Image (cartoon, helix red, strand yellow):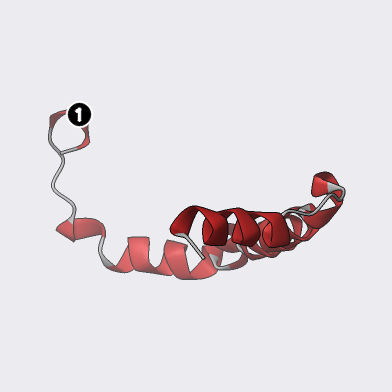
Amino acid sequence: MTLATIIALAAEETEHHGNVALETVGYGIVAILVFAGLALVTLSYRNVANRHAHKAEAYARAHANDVQRSGHGH
């Protein structure tokens, strides 16, 4: 057998006719699941600042003298 014959036989064996779109559906499903998980993580941090407003106010009262007032918030 020559190299060309071996390559031709290998190409013939690996060639298949199928629905390529159906074969790639799994990638889309995995992507949707990953993005849905990331969305849940993002939504879990929603309104966190308001849940601990009393802590922020207490910290601001305790450290009111530590803040130096200068122009433009610096």
Q: Can residue 61 be seen at all in this image of the molecule?
A: yes
Amino acid type, mark 1? His
Farthest-out residue, top = 72
Total numbered circles:
1
Q: Quadrant of residue 57?
A: bottom left
Whether residue 47 can be seen here: no
Q: Residue furthest front?
A: 1
In the figure, is residue 31 to the left or right of 56? right
How far from the left and from the top, in percent, is residue 24? 76, 53
User: Which residue bears the numbered disc 1?
Assistant: 72
Residue at 53% x, 67% y: name it: 54
Residue 35 x/y as whole percent: 67, 56
**Mark 1 surroundings within 10 Å by alpha-carbon count, few (fewer than 14), some (14 through 19), many (20 or more):** few
Q: Is residue 56 left or right of residue 31?
A: left
The residue at the point 71 percent across, 62 percent down is: 13
Q: Residue at x 55, y 57 (%)?
A: 5
Where residue 26 appears, as percent x and y from the top left, is 78, 61
Q: Is residue 56 left or right of residue 47?
A: left
Decide which of 43, 52 is in the foreground and name it.
43
* Nearer to the camera, 16 or 3: 3
Name the residue located 42 percent from the left edge and 68 percent from the top edge. 58
Residue 56 at x, y percent in the picture: 44, 64
Horizontal side of residue 1 vs 25, given as left or right: left
Q: Quadrant of residue 61?
A: bottom left
Residue 11's place in the image compared with 55, above or below, is above
